[in-house]
Structures are given as structure tokens and as C-alpha cells.
Image (tube, rainbow, N blue to C red):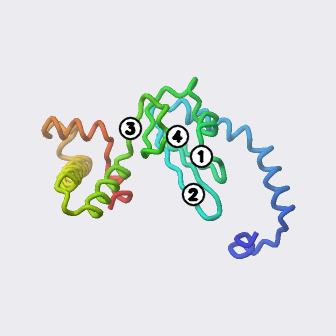
Amino acid sequence: MEQLRFFWGLQLSKSQADALLSRLSREWHVELDRLCQLIAVSAVVHTDETSWSIGSVWAFLSEQSRLLIFGCRKDAATLEILLPKATFAGVLVSDDAAVYRRFTQAQKCWAHLLRKAIKLTIIKPDDTRYRTFCDGLLAVDRSAHAAATDKRLGDNAGLPNWTRRCVASVGITARLSHFVR
């Protein structure tokens, strides 16, 4: 209630806010169901979740749809409602959270992988395995970003095979740069 008052000057009691949310949920449930269905039939879905002090947020993004769920439980039961096994046959791109392990067609998020590699390198700077791994990932990232932004490469035909495969498999584009820099 404090946020509504502070940001928008709304003087609502808790019961008024609850009544409004209940009414909105009744009126918008059809649209929410449609969004969930669009996400569930997508070829690729990116997902991430976070906890805030005011609740949790779970995001699902596909080429055509975006769905943000606030204040939900981030567990297998909620995920089954949002992305049912019987419907979703696409690739799920996520972090390494246990809740996503039921998906057989999965890809780990490039930004999460880079952050983990950097974190391991900082925590254990003397471990050359982590430094080598991190340096390799960053080299692939730089090559992919260069390929994605260099218009002279066209379909990336001029790239070495390993770089072309990396660009295709991790789907890196210039749009991801704000997540990893």
C-alpha cells in the first residue's frame, strides 16, 4: 500500500487493493491463459526467476510473447501450470536451477554461464582451470558479438566452423550484451 501511495498518490486500503486485484484477475484470466498458451507452444523459451523483498518474479520470454508472474511460488507445480510437459516441446533456456531439470531439451543461459565462470575465477584466482575456462568463454562471446554485428559476414560463412557452431548454438546476438557486460 505504501508503494501505491508513494509512487502514484493512491490512497487505497488493503481491502480495496485486494478487491481490485480480484476483479482484474477475473477479467484478465482469458488473456493470461492465452499468453501462457503462446509461451507453451513456442520453439524457444527463455526463463529466469528472482526473489525480491516484496515478493518473487518469474519471467518467461519467447520470440512472440513475454510473461511476468509476480508473487508466485517458484516450484515444479507452478512451472507445470505455466509450461506444461504435454504442450511444451521446445528448448528451455535457463540458469541451472533445479526446477528446470525436467526439461530434456534445455540450454543453459549464456549470461548465467559467463557470470558463474567470472565468479569462480574471482573466488579462486590461482586455479588455472577456472581462468582458462573463463578466458575461453569470453573469447567465444567476443567472436559471437563481432559476428552478430559485422554486416560483411552475411550468414557468417567467413567464420571458422567452431565459431559458426557457437554462434548458432548459444544464440548470441548484440541484444544480449547488456546482460553480460
Depth check, front residue: 62 or 111:
111
Mark 3 or mark 1: which is in front?
Answer: 1
Query: Would you name the residue on which mark 3 appears?
Result: 107
Q: First in sequence, mark 4 or 2: give its number.
A: 2
Q: Nearer the viewer, residue 127 or 108?
A: 127
Q: Earlier in the sequence, mark 2 or mark 3?
A: 2
Q: Position of residue 164 (x, y in %)?
A: 20, 37
Q: Is residue 78 above or below residue 123?
A: above
Between the C-alphas of marks 4 and 2, the distance is 15 Å
User: At numbered mark 3, what does the secondary structure look like: helix, strand or loop?
Assistant: strand
Quarter of the image holding residue 124? bottom left
Q: Earlier in the sequence, mark 1 or mark 2?
A: 2
Q: Mark 2 — residue? A: 51
Q: How far separated are the C-alphas under marks 2 and 3?
A: 22 Å
Earlier residue among tags 1 and 4: 1
Are the residues tagged 1 and 2 within 8 Å (C-beta)?
Answer: yes
Tag 1: residue type?
Lys
Report helix, strand or loop for mark 1.
loop
Quarter of the image where the N terminus is located? bottom right
Residue bearing mark 4? 99
Instruction: Determine which residue is flagged by label 1.
Output: 74
- The residue depicted at 49 percent of the width and 41 percent of the height is 98
Q: CA distance from mark 3 to mark 4?
A: 14 Å
Task: Please provide percent x and percent y for residue 37.
Answer: 61, 32
- Looking at the rendering, which quadrant does residue 27 occupy? top right
What's the residue at 78%, 54% (across, down)? 21
Q: Amino acid at mark 3?
A: Gln
Residues 68 and 104: in front is 104
Question: Which amino acid, by three-letter code, is at mark 2?
Answer: Ser
Where 127 sits versus 69, above or below?
A: below
- Circles 1, 4 touching at the beta carbon (< 8 Å): yes
